Image (spheres, rainbow, N blue to C red):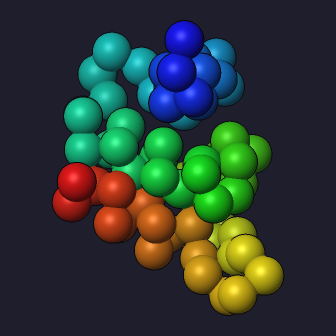
Amino acid sequence: MTIGAIKKEVATKMGLINQNTSPQDVNGMLAAAHLSGPGGVKKMMRGGNPRDAFGTGAREYYNLGRRG
């Protein structure tokens, strides 16, 4: 199992994605999870924007991931 598949499985178990989630949104969430973890994605989806040590926000990674 790849790291991406593991992250997708975790996001599914956390209720962040389901069969109706668009592929673009899944890609965006996986990119954001790379930066802030699944918990950070959950915070982001509730309106927050967790940041890394350099100030990059999860929302920025989400948007980059959506564009694929």
Can you say whether 60 is above or below 62 in the image? below
- Relative horizontal placement of residue 3, taking residue 52 as reference (left or right): left
Furthest residue in direction bottom, as rendered: 55
Can you say whether 66 is above or below 42 in the image? below
- Find residue 45 and report its horizontal and vertical position in percent: 55, 53
- Find residue 42 and report its horizontal and vertical position in percent: 65, 47
Q: Nearer the viewer, residue 27 or 41?
A: 27
Residue at 63% of width from left, 72% of height from top? Answer: 49
- Find residue 35 and report its horizontal and vertical position in percent: 63, 60
Query: What is the count of numbered marks?
Result: 0
Can you say whether 38 is above or below 59 in the image? above
Furthest residue in direction front, as rendered: 2
Residue 12 visible somewhere in the drawing: no
Residue at 47% of width from left, 52% of height from top? Answer: 31
- Relative horizontal placement of residue 62, taking residue 14 as reference (left or right): left
Residue at 57% of width from left, 28% of height from top? Answer: 3
Residue 32 visible somewhere in the drawing: yes
On the image, which quarter does residue 19 sit in? top left
- Find residue 25 and report its horizontal and vertical position in percent: 33, 44
Residue at 22% of width from left, 54% of height from top? Answer: 68
